[in-house]
Image: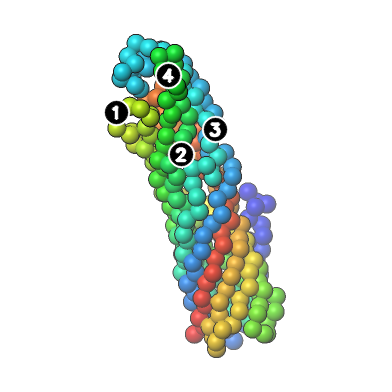
């Protein structure tokens, strides 16, 4: 953990130290940014198989028949696609090269409807697919950080930034159904709502488009402390409790408009 946050903390400390030396020559900045976050590929849930002695609890027409449940491994990008993000930021141009800031941002991964496995039985002409409609995964983040500009003059200024803060991640639900049955989809909880540690770095370019107004493009790497749960979400299908894991890394891409005042 210390290794992951050392760079953001170093940048914040540098910004604060330099700001103390040159605060009188600075200006406040306000920024609004829009973007998205690349969907990571890491594992969301492992594969799970189970024998079902009585399929009637899952498929009422097959009461008394036996079968096998096969839930496939799901990666994070199997069940989510990139969604929108936006943020509001207040900064202070402490010197020509250093800008401490505070930022409030919102990020969304959009849930997919996907096949997550099937039920197999000699009583079925073909396996009955199991599908899940995943809710959107949303989070609000409050960060404090600093941005270092490598060039203090000119219209185009590359920068490196670091930040730390907290993220409030929403709970995750899904509607699970078995194809070919009249049973309504069952709403299950996969991950609980949680507040967790957040830190990251970003690189980008600021381009001045008018006096005291600039466009800013940035790409980052964001780390969140792990969130996981031993979930009973698929117990009604005959599965044992299984571990569900949120991703610790994400990669935001943002375009912002910055004003000095």
**Marked residue nearer the N-terminal end (1 or 3):** 3
Q: Nearer the viewer, mark 2 or mark 4?
A: 4
Q: Secondary structure at mark 4?
A: loop
Density class for disc 1 (Cα within 10 Å; few <14, some 14-19, many ≥20) is few
Q: Is residue 241 visible?
A: no
Which label sits on residue 182? 1
Q: Badge 2 is on which residue?
A: 114
Mark sitting earlier along the chain (4/3):
3
Q: Is residue 237 above or below residue 138?
A: above
Judge left or right: residue 140 versus residue 202.
left
The residue to which callout 3 is attached is 73
Residue 10: percent from left, percent from top: 66, 63
- Please name whichever residue, 46 or 65, is drawn nearer the observer in this view of the structure: 65
**Lower position in the chain sequence, tag 4 or tag 1:** 4
How far, Cα to Cα, is label 2 from label 4?
22 Å
Q: Residue furthest front?
A: 125
Q: CA distance from mark 3 to mark 2?
A: 12 Å
Residue 125 disc label: 4
CB under 8 Å between callouts 1 and 3?
A: no
Q: Residue at x 58, y 56 (%)?
A: 251
Residue 114 picture location, percent across and down = 46, 39
Q: Which mark is residue 253?
A: none
SS at mark 2 in the image: strand
């Amino acid at each position: 953990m210390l290794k992951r946050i050392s760079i953001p903390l170093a940048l914040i400390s540098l910004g604060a130290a330099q700001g103390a030396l040159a605060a009188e020559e600075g200006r406040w900045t306000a920024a609004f940014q829009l973007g998205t976050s690349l969907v990571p590929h890491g594992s969301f849930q492992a594969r799970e198989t189970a024998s079902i002695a009585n399929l009637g609890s899952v498929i009422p027409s097959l009461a008394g028949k036996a079968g096998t449940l096969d839930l496939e491994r799901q990666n994070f990008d199997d069940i989510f696609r990139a969604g929108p993000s936006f943020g509001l930021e207040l900064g202070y141009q402490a010197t020509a090269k250093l800008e401490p800031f505070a930022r409030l941002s919102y990020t969304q991964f959009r849930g997919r409807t996907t096949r997550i496995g099937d039920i197999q039985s000699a009583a079925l002409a073909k396996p009955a697919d199991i599908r899940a409609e995943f809710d959107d995964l949303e989070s609000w983040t409050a960060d404090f950080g600093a941005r270092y500009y490598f060039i203090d003059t000119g219209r185009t200024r590359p920068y490196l930034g670091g930040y730390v803060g907290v993220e409030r991640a929403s709970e995750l639900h899904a509607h699970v159904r078995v194809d070919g049955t009249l049973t309504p989809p069952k709403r299950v909880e996969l991950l609980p709502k949680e507040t967790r540690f957040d830190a990251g770095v970003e690189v980008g370019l600021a381009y001045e488009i008018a006096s005291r107004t600039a466009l800013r493009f940035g790409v980052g790497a964001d780390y969140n402390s792990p969130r996981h749960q031993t979930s009973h979400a698929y117990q009604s299908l005959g599965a044992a409790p299984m571990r569900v894991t949120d991703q610790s890394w994400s990669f935001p891409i943002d375009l912002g408009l910055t004003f000095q005042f």
